[in-house]
Image (cartoon, grey):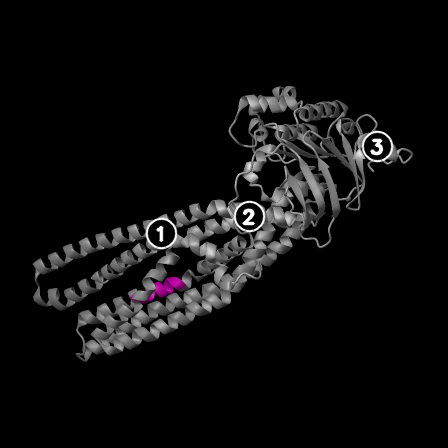
C-alpha cells in the first residue's frame, strides 16, 4: 500500500463525494440568495434613517416594512432549503459508503486479528455526516461573501472598508491559531479515546472473569489512567479553543462598536449620512459572522477532517474486492499445498509447509500439542487468514479467489471460542439469512440439539445474547455446530468441537459427523480427545507448525502405539493430545 501514489490515495473517497458535488453547487446557489437577502436589514435601516425619518412618510415606512417581512421569510425558507440539501448530501454519502466501510472494517479485523476490534470506521462515517449537517459547514459557504460586504463598505466610505479588512485579518489569524493549538491535541485525544472504548468493551465481554477473580479495581484503574490522559488532552485543547473563541467573539463585538463610533465621527463631519453609520456597523457584523463561526467550529472541522483521513486510509489499505466470476458449486475436494501461515501482527510462520489432500466426503482429524499451529491452519484452510506461501484449493480453485458471500453457504465452521449473536436461536442457526423452519430443524437434528432447544423457554424463538445468555458452554457449542451444518455444506472445519461436551454430547457429535460424512461433506476436526477420532479417515499430527505424521487413521495410530501421547479421556474429562 505504501507504493500507491499520493494522487490516488484518496480516489475512493473522492469518488464517493463526486456524485454529491451537484448538491454543494445548489447549496452554494442558495447561499448566494441567503447572503443577498441578508443585506435587506441593512438596506431597511439605511432607508429608515435617510428617507422615512426625513420625509415622515408613513406609507413609505409601511411598504418598506412589508418588503422586509417578505424578504426575511424568503431568507428563512432559503436557509431551510440549503440545510435540507446538505442533509440529503450527507445521507447519500453515508448510504454510498456504509456497506463499503463495513466490509473494509470487517476485512481489516480479519487481517489484523485482535488488534482491530473497534467500530471506529462506522463512527467516523456517522461523525462526518453529522458535521455536514451542522452549522460549521455553513461558514464555508458564507465566508466568501466577506469581500462583497467589504466592497459595499468601501462604497459607504474608504475608512469603513479599511476597518473591515483589518478586522477580517485579525479574525482569520484567530481562526488559524485555533486550528494550530487544538487540532493535534484533539486528534491524539480521539485516538486514545477509541483505545479506551475498545478496552471497556473488552472488559464488558469478560465481566464474569473480572468479577470472579476480583480484577475490577485493577482493570478500572488501568482504564482510568488512559481516560485521565484523554481528558487532559481534551481539556488542554478545549481551554485553548475556548480562549480563542471567546477572543474572537469579543473582538467581533468590539469591532462592530468601534465601527459604529467611526461612523458617528464620519457622520458628524458630514462625510456619510446617519443611516450609513448604522448600516456600516451592521455590515461589518454580517461580514465577520462566518469567520467567527469558523473559529468556534474549528474543533468540529478538525475532527471531521481526521475522520475523513481515517476513512480514506482504511479504504486505501483495504481495497474493494475485485469482481470475480461465479464458480460452480463446490463438491468438497480439498487440496492444501505447501501452506505457510503467519498470524496477524506476527513475523514468523506458525504453520510451515503443510500439504495434504482430501476427497469429497473424507474426514481428517488433526491433533498435536498446544501452540502447534492447528487453529492457524484451520483459519488458513477457510481463507480467514491468507497463506503467506502455498495454496489452499477447493475443487481446484484457490480458496482466496472465491467470493466469500457465494462460498459461505457451502462452508461450515465451528471455532474454539463459540460466538453466538444477539437474536433468536433460529436466527443464529440459519446464519441470519431467511428463516427456513425446515432447514433450521434439520440442522438442529443433525447436530443432535433439537430436543435441547425444545426444552428452552421459547424453543427456537428463545432470544440469546452474544455470549449465549441462558445457555451453558456445551449448549452453545452444540448450537454452534447446528449453525455449521446448516444447509448441508460441502466443507466443514471444526476446532475442538467437543471441548465443552460430556460423553453423551460427544457421542451425538460423532453420530452427526458420520451423517455429514455419508452426505459427502469433507470434514476437518481438530481435537485433543480421541472419541471423535472414531469417524475420521485420516489423521494428521502437527508439531511446531509442521506435519509430523499424516496417513490413514489405523496407520498413524499404529505408529503411535507404544507412545501414549493420545489417551482416551476418563468419563467427563478431556484427554491429553499428541
Residue closest to the far bottom:
269
Q: Earlier in the sequence, mark 2 or mark 3?
A: 2
* Numbered label attached to residue 86: 1
Q: Is residue 290 left or right of residue 390?
A: left
Between marks 2 and 3, how big is the CA–CA gap? 45 Å
Q: Please tell me whether mark 2 or mark 3 is closer to you in this view.
A: 3
Work out which quarter of the rendered image holds the C terminus and state it. Answer: top right
Q: Is residue 21 left or right of residue 494?
A: left
Magenta stretch, main secondary structure, is helix
Q: Which residue is mark 3?
A: 555
Between marks 1 and 3, how big is the CA–CA gap? 71 Å
331 over 518 or under it: above or below:
below
Q: Earlier in the sequence, mark 2 or mark 1?
A: 1
Q: Please tell me whether mark 2 or mark 1 is closer to you in this view.
A: 2
Residue 276 seen anywhere in this rendered image of the structure = yes
Q: Secondary structure at mark 3?
A: helix
* Numbered label attached to residue 105: 2
Q: Quadrant of residue 317?
A: bottom right
Q: Earlier in the sequence, mark 1 or mark 3?
A: 1
Task: Identify the magenta region.
Answer: 287-294
503 over 186 or under it: above or below:
above
Q: Residues within 10 Å of mark 2 (few under 14, many from 20)?
A: many
Amino acid at each position: 500500500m505504501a507504493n500507491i501514489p499520493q494522487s490516488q490515495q484518496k480516489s475512493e473517497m473522492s469518488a464517493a463525494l463526486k456524485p454529491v458535488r451537484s448538491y454543494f453547487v445548489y447549496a452554494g446557489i442558495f447561499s448566494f440568495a441567503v447572503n443577498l437577502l441578508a443585506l435587506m436589514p441593512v438596506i431597511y435601516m439605511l432607508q429608515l434613517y435617510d428617507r422615512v425619518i426625513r420625509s415622515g412618510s408613513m406609507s413609505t415606512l409601511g411598504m418598506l416594512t412589508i418588503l422586509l417581512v417578505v424578504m426575511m421569510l424568503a431568507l428563512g425558507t432559503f436557509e431551510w432549503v440549503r440545510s435540507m440539501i446538505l442533509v440529503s448530501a450527507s445521507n447519500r454519502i453515508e448510504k454510498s459508503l456504509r456497506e463499503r466501510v463495513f466490509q473494509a472494517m470487517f476485512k481489516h479485523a480479519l487481517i489484523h486479528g485482535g488488534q482491530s476490534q473497534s467500530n471506529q470506521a462506522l463512527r467516523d462515517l456517522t461523525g462526518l455526516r453529522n458535521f455536514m449537517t451542522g452549522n460549521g459547514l455553513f461558514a464555508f459557504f458564507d465566508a466568501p461573501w466577506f469581500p462583497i460586504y467589504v466592497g459595499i463598505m468601501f462604497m459607504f466610505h474608504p475608512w469603513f472598508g479599511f476597518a473591515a479588512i483589518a478586522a477580517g485579518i485579525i479574525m482569520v489569524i484567530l481562526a488559524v491559531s485555533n486550528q494550530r493549538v487544538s487540532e493535534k491535541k484533539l486528534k491524539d485525544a480521539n485516538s486514545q479515546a477509541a483505545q479506551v472504548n475498545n478496552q471497556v468493551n473488552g472488559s464488558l465481554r469478560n465481566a464474569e472473569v473480572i468479577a470472579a477473580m476480583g480484577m475490577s479495581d485493577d482493570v478500572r484503574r488501568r482504564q482510568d489512567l488512559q481516560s485521565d490522559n484523554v481528558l487532559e488532552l481534551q481539556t488542554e485543547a478545549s481551554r485553548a479553543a475556548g480562549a480563542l473563541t471567546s477572543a474572537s467573539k469579543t473582538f467581533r463585538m468590539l469591532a462592530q462598536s468601534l465601527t459604529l463610533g467611526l461612523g458617528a465621527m464620519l457622520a458628524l463631519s458630514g462625510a456619510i449620512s446617519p443611516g450609513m453609520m448604522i448600516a456600516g456597523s451592521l455590515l461589518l457584523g454580517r461580514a465577520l459572522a462566518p469567520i467567527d463561526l469558523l473559529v468556534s467550529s474549528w474543533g468540529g472541522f478538525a475532527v471531521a477532517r481526521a475522520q475523513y483521513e481515517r476513512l480514506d486510509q482504511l479504504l486505501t489499505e483495504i481495497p474493494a474486492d475485485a469482481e470475480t466470476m461465479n464458480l460452480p458449486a463446490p463438491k468438497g475436494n480439498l487440496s492444501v499445498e505447501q501452506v505457510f501461515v503467519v498470524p496477524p501482527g506476527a513475523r514468523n510462520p506458525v504453520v510451515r509447509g503443510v500439504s495434504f489432500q482430501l476427497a469429497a466426503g473424507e474426514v481428517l482429524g488433526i491433533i498435536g500439542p498446544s501452540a502447534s499451529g492447528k487453529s492457524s491452519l484451520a483459519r488458513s484452510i477457510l481463507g480467514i487468514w491468507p497463506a503467506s506461501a502455498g495454496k489452499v484449493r477447493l475443487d481446484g480453485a484457490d480458496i482466496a479467489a472465491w467470493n466469500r458471500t457465494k462460498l459461505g453457504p457451502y462452508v461450515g465452521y465451528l471455532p474454539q471460542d463459540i460466538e453466538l449473536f444477539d437474536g433468536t436461536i433460529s436466527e443464529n442457526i440459519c446464519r441470519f439469512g431467511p428463516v427456513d423452519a425446515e432447514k433450521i430443524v434439520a440442522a438442529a437434528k443433525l447436530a443432535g440439539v433439537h430436543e435441547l432447544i425444545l426444552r428452552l423457554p421459547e424453543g427456537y424463538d428463545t432470544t440469546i445474547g452474544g455470549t449465549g445468555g441462558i445457555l451453558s458452554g456445551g449448549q452453545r457449542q452444540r448450537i454452534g455446530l447446528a449453525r455449521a451444518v446448516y444447509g448441508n455444506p460441502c466443507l466443514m472445519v471444526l476446532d475442538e468441537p467437543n471441548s465443552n461436551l460430556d460423553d453423551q454430547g460427544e457421542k451425538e457429535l460423532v453420530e452427526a459427523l458420520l451423517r455429514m460424512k455419508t452426505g459427502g461433506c469433507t470434514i476437518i476436526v481438530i481435537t485433543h480427545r480421541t472419541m471423535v477420532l472414531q469417524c475420521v479417515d485420516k489423521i494428521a499430527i502437527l508439531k511446531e507448525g509442521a506435519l509430523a505424521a499424516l496417513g490413514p487413521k489405523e496407520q498413524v495410530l499404529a505408529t503411535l502405539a507404544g507412545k501414549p501421547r493420545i489417551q482416551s479421556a476418563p468419563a467427563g474429562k478431556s484427554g491429553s493430545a499428541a
